Image (cartoon, helix red, strand yellow):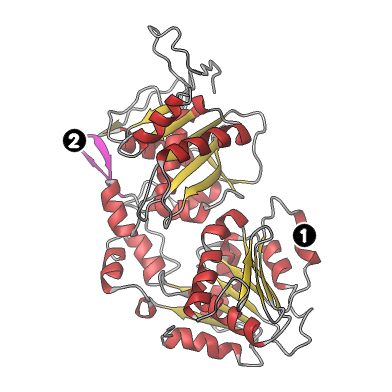
């Protein structure tokens, strides 16, 4: 049975105010903003027949692992049954169709793939939900919200529900700051959740409070103007400047693969093109189990489809990752093994002729430093349309560091996992891809004494 707290109930009540046509839900993590939005959307679609409700996310690939599971979970919590009994869920197109003819459709709002929002302009909707709206370009946000009120013959409200964290940019300037100043128009209602509204356990909240001060100020205490990031190698302003719209189509590709088999960790493949983080794919989701041999088969197919070549792949070779490496070897492929606790690698650097003067306690600290410094000096970029980019940023900026006896050490992955509540799988996969991409001489080293082992070595001599 779904139990709403005071703020969640307030959001539901706001929908019944005839003067409100835009409901903005912001605030602390774990407070169920997306869940409340899903509850409202499902309730209206269930009550009013032939409601057409698109749910927008910047990337559909991200939506499949985030917003869509939230909606399916909410349907279950509300006691609705799928497989045609109360509704039907389909993929490609991704939508939930109710027996009364109402449809919830999940759509992409990516400015890099849909210039000017031309695909969105063709949607005639009753209402809409924009999830993580701060990720969208403002033009895409306007296009998405403008499609409501075009299919409301049965009395359903014409409504936009916005869920977001107003970090920077237009979402803060146009919604959050006017809300705090009390200058928003009457038709826009903002409900700000705080940590007391969280649906998480006290233990989980206590773990979140151990995150860096800048993070807790923003994401737990709603202090969106807080900017002290002194304990993190990654800075918000540098990250924002690293976002690019396009890729160099001729640049070589490298990939990293962080391996999981069961439990709550994910298996993630990250792709770097040139020095731009271009794509992230979740291969094994949190709730899935997947044998390492199956994951190896997936990589063989993916390397062909995406075009990076397994010789340009680095795999987490600790624990379960060994199983993927062994499976690839049996198939006749060799990938680079990445061991985060190994010694720093002098061949990995941002520029071919520049050796770092910073000392590191291990390879992982070295890679994190190179990633952060590469962003700062403008070498490493992020493609705006890269899936999970906001989550990647969150994982990256959680990493504290310290310098002792002139050696830089980054906070351990175990500590990050305790504070984050899960493993930083996206971040680690990116580090592995950069481990390959930041080699100025060769993408793949082969033992000079091993002239012919019968495997695909894929030796490449191009420089960066």
In the image, taking residue 176 as reference, residue 137 lies left or right, namely: right
Relative depth, front residue between 338 and 264: 264
In the image, taking residue 124 as reference, residue 425 lies left or right, namely: left
* Residue found 48% across the figure and 19% down from its top: 442
- Up-down relation of residue 56 to residue 158 (above or below): above
Relative depth, front residue between 355 and 463: 463
Q: Residues within 10 Å of mark 1 (few under 14, many from 20)?
A: some
User: Which of the numbered marks, if any, corresponds to residue 119?
Assistant: 1
Residue 38 visible somewhere in the drawing: yes
Across and down, in percent, residue 280 comes to 53, 46
* Residue found 67% across the figure and 60% down from its top: 109
* Residue found 46% across the figure and 34% down from its top: 434
Identify the image quadrant of residue 142.
bottom right
Residue bearing the label numbered 2:
405
The answer to whether residue 30 is magenta is no
User: Which quadrant is home to the N terminus?
Assistant: bottom left
In the image, taking residue 189 as reference, residue 227 lies left or right, namely: left
CA distance separating discs 2 and 1: 57 Å
Q: Which residues are magenta?
A: 400-411
Across and down, in percent, residue 213 comes to 32, 61
* Residue found 47% across the figure and 13% down from its top: 454
Identify the image quadrant of residue 394.
bottom left
* Mark 1, secondary structure of its residue: loop
* Mark 2, secondary structure of its residue: loop
Q: Earlier in the sequence, mark 2 or mark 1?
A: 1
Across and down, in percent, residue 184 comes to 61, 82
Main SS of the magenta part reads strand
- Up-down relation of residue 303 to residue 46 (above or below): above
User: Which quadrant is home to the C terminus?
Assistant: top right
The answer to whether residue 402 is magenta is yes
């Amino acid at each position: 049975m779904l139990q709403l707290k005071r703020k969640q109930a307030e959001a539901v009540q706001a929908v019944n105010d005839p003067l409100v046509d835009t409901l903005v839900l912001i605030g602390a993590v774990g407070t169920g903003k997306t869940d409340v939005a899903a509850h409202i959307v499902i309730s209206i679609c269930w009550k009013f027949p032939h409601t057409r409700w698109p749910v927008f996310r910047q990337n559909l690939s991200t939506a499949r692992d985030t917003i869509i599971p939230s909606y399916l979970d909410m349907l279950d919590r509300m006691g609705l049954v799928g497989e045609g009994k109360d509704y039907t869920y389909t993929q490609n197109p991704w939508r939930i169709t109710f027996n009364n003819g109402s449809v919830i459709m999940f759509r992409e709002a990516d400015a890099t793939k849909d210039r000017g929002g031309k695909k969105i302009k063709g949607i005639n909707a009753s209402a809409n939900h924009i999830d993580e709206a701060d990720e969208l370009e403002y033009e895409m946000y306007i296009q998405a919200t403008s499609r409501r009120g075009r299919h409301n013959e049965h009395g359903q409200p014409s409504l936009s529900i916005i869920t977001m964290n107003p970090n920077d940019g237009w979402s803060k300037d146009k919604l959050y700051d006017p809300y705090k100043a009390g200058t928003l128009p009457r038709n826009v209602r903002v409900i700000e959740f705080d940590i007391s509204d969280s649906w998480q356990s006290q233990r989980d909240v206590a773990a979140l409070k151990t995150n860096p001060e800048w993070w807790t100020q923003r994401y737990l205490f709603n202090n969106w103007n807080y900017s002290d990031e002194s304990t993190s190698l990654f800075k918000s302003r540098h990250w924002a400047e690293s976002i690019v719209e396009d890729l160099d189509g001729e640049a070589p590709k490298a990939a990293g693969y962080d391996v999981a088999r069961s439990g709550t960790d994910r298996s993630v493949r990250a792709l770097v093109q040139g020095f731009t983080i271009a794509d992230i794919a979740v291969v094994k989701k949190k709730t899935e189990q997947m044998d390492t041999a199956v994951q190896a088969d997936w990589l063989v197919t993916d390397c062909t489809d995406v075009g990076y070549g397994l010789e340009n792949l680095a795999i987490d070779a600790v624990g379960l990752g060994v199983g993927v490496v062994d499976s690839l070897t049996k198939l006749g492929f060799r990938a680079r093994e990445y061991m985060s606790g190994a010694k720093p690698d002098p061949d990995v650097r941002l520029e071919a002729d520049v050796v770092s003067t910073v000392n590191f306690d291990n390879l992982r600290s070295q890679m994190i430093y190179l990633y952060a410094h590469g962003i700062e000096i403008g070498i490493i970029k992020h493609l705006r349309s890269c899936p999970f980019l906001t989550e990647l940023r969150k994982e990256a900026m959680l990493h504290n560091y310290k310098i002792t006896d002139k050696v830089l050490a980054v906070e351990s992955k175990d500590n990050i996992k305790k504070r984050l509540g899960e493993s930083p799988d996206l971040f680690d996969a990116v580090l592995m891809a950069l481990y390959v991409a930041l080699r100025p001489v060769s993408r793949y080293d082969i033992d000079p004494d091993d002239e012919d082992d019968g495997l695909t070595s894929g030796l490449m001599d191009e420089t960066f």
